[in-house]
Image (tube, rainbow, N blue to C red):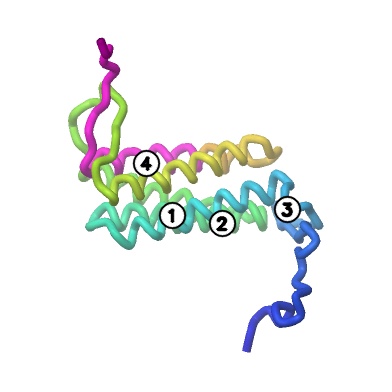
Amino acid sequence: MLIKNCLARFICPGDNGDTIVYWKGSARSARKDDPVVKLYGALETAIAYSHKVANILPRPQARIMRLVAFSLMELGFYLATGKAEYLDTATALYRRALKKIYSIAPEKPITSWLVCTSAECSAVDEARVWIRWAERRATSLEGAELAVKLLNQLSNLTFEVIRTLPHIEFRHKKIA
């Protein structure tokens, strides 16, 4: 049995470029290019990439990225419902991940751009980019200040994961 019976009839809701979006506990009709819909799209992609990379990383990096993904999911619940308990859980998951990254973070300071040299590192970078993209989408929305802050912290945390994986440091070199 299909969950969406509309598939067989080719008449699913949203076929006309609109959808129902939930924002802080209120449902409203919105075009699919609405800023809230775009934020949810970026957040959904960040979650998918975070889970995907958690499936290919070794421990403890895999656990960190799984915590990042769950934190993003809870953040989405918070944005949809407005319930503080979801934001609290998202923040607690972030703090767990932060505690784990502290235990493996390199001591060496960064003095250049980091360029991934493994598929795993590149996959973390993709998740980081999507988290950053969600953050940029959230900045355009009133009432998303706490989400912006958490998204910024999560993207910074994923950068720290990158530092623990194979990479090179790129510095500008004048080419003669």
State the SS at label 4. helix
CA separation, marks 3 and 1? 22 Å
Instruction: Name which residue type carries label 4.
Output: Leu
Residue 38: percent from left, percent from top = 65, 48
Quarter placement of the C terminus: top left
The numbered mark at residue 85 is 2
Quadrant of the image occupied by residue 7: bottom right
State the SS at label 2. helix
Of the numbered discs 4 and 1, the one sitting upstream in the chain is 1
- Within 10 Å of the Cα at label 2, are there few (<14), some (14-19), or many (20+) other Cα atoms? few
Of the numbered discs 1 and 2, the one sitting upstream in the chain is 1
Q: Is residue 163 left or right of residue 45?
A: left
Q: Nearer the viewer, residue 154 or 5?
A: 5
Q: Are marks 4 and 1 in contact (CB under 8 Å)?
A: no
Quarter placement of the N terminus: bottom right
Q: Nearer the viewer, residue 75 or 12?
A: 12
From what the image shows, is residue 139 above or below residue 171?
below
CA separation, marks 4 and 3? 30 Å
Q: Residue at x 78, y 53 (%)?
A: 30
The numbered mark at residue 32 is 3
Instruction: Name which residue type carries label 3.
Output: Lys
Quadrant of the image occupied by residue 16: bottom right
Q: Are marks 4 and 2 in contact (CB under 8 Å)?
A: no
Q: Is residue 43 left or right of residue 107?
A: right
Q: Residue at x 18, y 32 (%)?
A: 107
Look at the image and give the residue range highlighted in magenta.
150-176
- Residue that protrudes farthest toward the left in the picture: 107
Q: Residue at x 44, y 39 (%)?
A: 153
Circle 1 is placed at which residue position?
49
The numbered mark at residue 157 is 4
